[in-house]
Image (tube, helix red, strand yellow):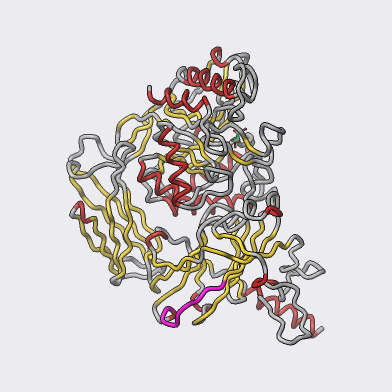
């Protein structure tokens, strides 16, 4: 009996020790003092999770996270990270090891790094930050479990200060990308399930009391207003009153001192003359350097000032109607697939977006990496950002809802200061039900509690009401600012009937066609009724753009999709070969004929 009690107490202790050291998401990571842990990481493919469970499927104390080494010649240790292969981090495992192309399961990652004793001084905290890990990460530092994170496209970080030691330290991450019906996304989705540590890993250095996040936005105002209000709110990492924060925007000659309240918050409104403020727009992506200083530590960011709102069926940017000339895009490198994860990747893909003549981009179907959002902001590209509440989610599962809500919260907290982000999307093509309406309605309301300066939308579906009448009927219309829907006239239905189509969208709100398109294999030519030829796709774009011109209240579109992308659902030999071929560019960066149709249509917009 005593042995059982001891075991239970040990497990309880482990659980307490295993309690996550996760800290709230820290904003503006690019401006923080950081040591990069990017580079070569050793990895072990662990199909049966031998490194986590014993042979009775109990979580073992002697797992791979202990990084054990034989101490005596007779010792038995059946793994060795230092002798295991390496791969580049950030990076998905599917495109770095042929054995992992289709793999869905656990891979362990291992990285040694040095910390100088001077970095472990009083008043300094060390945060271990991950830009994203798909799908589940369990993180250990020097053998201690720091915590667990789920969700493959949003950042997270742990305070590891009291675990680090001067000299060599070890971080080990158990990554598991197995799909699960209660995950977000669920078990089926039309993109590749790239697994691994797919974005940057950084060891951040912050003072004990630091600016955790902030929000700086331009208040809406009448177009003729002579003065504009810049709303500022700042949040410390601690509920500490009396901390002094100096805020300055040198180019606008604005400077103000704020003092935090008992919750560690501070807020103010800066007044600026309309004449001197240059508003951010696609034509003028003006950013201002903003400095936030606390205890002689300055955090700088580049902030754009603009307003986005709707009026009837119009979307207004800085009070003026705008047509969103967009394109949808997955987060995949321009050539050969694999997760895009650096500035160079973003530059190549967004260069294509600009060449197409776009002012808008739908980052489908999940939050993309921060490089892409920030570069798009500098290039004057407006952004639709989305969480992967995609298709047939486990609507009745409270844990699933909490997961979606957490991903939505982190997406907003990471990018809430990016002027180019104008739409938060909470879903894509979800089947109608009361549970789904409640789930998404709650998400929409939650988004509004976090951010009232942007629009809420989601990609809905139209139903063919009769032969040529298309009707949008979705209870979610009351929760969104912009009604958006996907339609595939000419591809999944009515191949030759686009010109006859009529559209019934009974909502006094702007409309975005968030997807239309069709597939083509680059270089495959033939008559325009021959499926998969470039001519078929070209004709589809000719007919669809003409049809879109007839949709009342159309405020924009993001055709599907910039480039061919990997999908396990697309298996047609010689044509798809595990690629979705609806791209205007091939998976090797070749333009297809349809590219020029959309480019020309946008020129006329
Ligand atoms: C759907 C879905 C996309 C998918 C596309 C297609 O609308 O939103 O994720 O890739 O259609 O069928 O190609």
Name the residue nearer the viewer: 82 or 431: 82
Residue 51 position, x and y percent, is: 72, 69
Question: Where ligand 1 lies, by image quadrant?
Answer: top right
Q: How many marks?
A: 0
Residue 17 position, x and y percent, is: 61, 76
Quadrant into which the C terminus falls:
top left
Kindly identify the residue that appears in the image at 30 percent across and 42 percent down: 280
Q: Is residue 254 left or right of residue 507?
A: left
User: In the current view of this chain or complex, which residue is farthest to the top?
Assistant: 500
Q: Is residue 435 in sight in this rendering?
A: no
The quarter holding residue 359 reads top left
Quadrant into which the N terminus falls:
bottom right
Kindly identify the residue that appears in the image at 72 percent across and 33 percent down: 573
In the rendered structure, does residue 48 fall within the stretch colored magenta? no
Residue 74, placed above or below residue 482: below
Q: Is residue 342 left or right of residue 2?
A: left
Residue 428 position, x and y percent, is: 57, 38
Name the residue nearer the viewer: 450 or 88: 88
Residue 267 position, x and y percent, is: 31, 58
Residue 605, placed above or below residue 82: above
In the rendered structure, does residue 117 fall within the stretch colored magenta? yes
The magenta-colored residue range is 112-119
Q: Is residue 78 in sight in this rendering?
A: yes
Name the residue nearer the viewer: 564 or 256: 564
Kindly identify the residue that appears in the image at 41 percent across and 59 percent down: 27
């Amino acid at each position: 009996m005593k042995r059982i009690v001891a075991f239970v107490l040990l497990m309880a202790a482990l659980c307490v020790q295993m309690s996550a050291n996760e800290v709230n998401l820290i904003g503006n990571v690019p401006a923080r003092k950081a040591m990069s842990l990017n580079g070569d990481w050793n990895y072990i493919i662990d199909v049966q999770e031998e490194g986590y469970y014993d042979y009775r499927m109990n979580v073992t104390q002697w797992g791979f996270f202990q990084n054990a080494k034989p101490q005596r010649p007779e010792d038995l240790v059946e793994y060795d990270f230092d002798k295991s292969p390496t791969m580049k981090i950030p990076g998905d495992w599917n495109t770095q090891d042929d054995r992992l192309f289709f793999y869905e399961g656990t891979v362990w990652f291992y990285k040694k790094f040095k910390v100088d004793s001077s970095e472990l001084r009083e008043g300094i905290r060390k945060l271990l930050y991950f830009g994203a890990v798909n799908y589940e990460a369990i993180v250990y530092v020097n053998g201690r479990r720091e915590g667990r994170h789920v969700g493959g496209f949003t950042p997270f970080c742990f305070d590891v200060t009291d675990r680090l030691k001067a000299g060599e330290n070890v971080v080990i991450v158990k990554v598991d990308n197995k799909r699960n019906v209660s995950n977000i996304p669920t078990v089926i989705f039309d993109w590749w399930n790239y697994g691994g540590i797919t974005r940057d890993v950084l060891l951040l250095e912050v003072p004990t009391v630091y600016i955790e996040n902030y929000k700086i936005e331009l208040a809406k105002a009448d177009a003729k207003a002579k003065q504009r209000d810049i709303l500022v709110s700042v949040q410390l990492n601690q509920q500490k009153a009396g901390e002094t924060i100096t805020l300055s925007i040198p180019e606008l000659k604005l400077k103000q001192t704020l003092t935090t309240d008992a919750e560690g918050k501070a807020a103010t409104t800066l007044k600026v003359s309309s004449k001197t403020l240059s508003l951010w727009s696609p034509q003028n992506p003006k950013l201002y350097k903003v400095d936030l200083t606390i205890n002689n530590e300055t955090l700088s960011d580049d902030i754009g000032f603009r307003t986005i709102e709707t009026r009837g069926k119009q979307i207004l940017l800085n009070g003026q109607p705008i047509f969103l000339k967009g394109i949808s895009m997955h987060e995949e490198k321009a050539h050969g697939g694999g997760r895009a994860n650096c500035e160079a990747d973003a530059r190549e893909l967004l260069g294509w977006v600009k060449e197409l003549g776009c002012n808008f981009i739908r980052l489908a179907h999940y939050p993309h990496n921060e490089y892409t959002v920030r570069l798009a902001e500098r290039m004057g590209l407006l952004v639709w950002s989305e969480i992967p509440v995609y298709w047939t989610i486990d609507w009745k599962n409270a844990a699933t809802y909490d997961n979606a809500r957490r991903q939505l919260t982190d997406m907003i907290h990471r990018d809430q200061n990016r002027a180019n982000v104008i739409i938060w999307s909470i879903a894509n093509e979800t089947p109608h039900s009361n549970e789904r309406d409640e789930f998404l309605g709650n998400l929409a309301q939650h988004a509004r509690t976090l951010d009232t300066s942007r629009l809420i939308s989601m990609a809905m579906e139209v139903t063919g009401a009769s032969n040529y009448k298309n009707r949008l009927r979705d209870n979610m219309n009351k929760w969104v600012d912009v009604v958006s829907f996907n339609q595939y006239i000419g591809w999944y239905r009515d191949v030759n009937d686009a010109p006859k189509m009529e559209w019934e969208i009974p909502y006094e709100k702007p409309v975005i066609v968030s997807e239309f398109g069709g597939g083509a294999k680059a270089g495959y030519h033939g008559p325009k009724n021959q499926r998969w030829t470039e001519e078929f796709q070209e004709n589809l774009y000719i007919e669809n753009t003409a049809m879109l011109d007839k949709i009342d209240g159309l405020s924009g579109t993001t055709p599907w999709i910039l480039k061919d992308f990997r999908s396990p659902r697309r298996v047609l030999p010689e044509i798809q070969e595990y690629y979705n071929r609806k791209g205007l560019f091939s998976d090797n960066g070749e333009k297809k004929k349809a590219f020029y149709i959309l480019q020309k249509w946008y020129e006329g917009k």
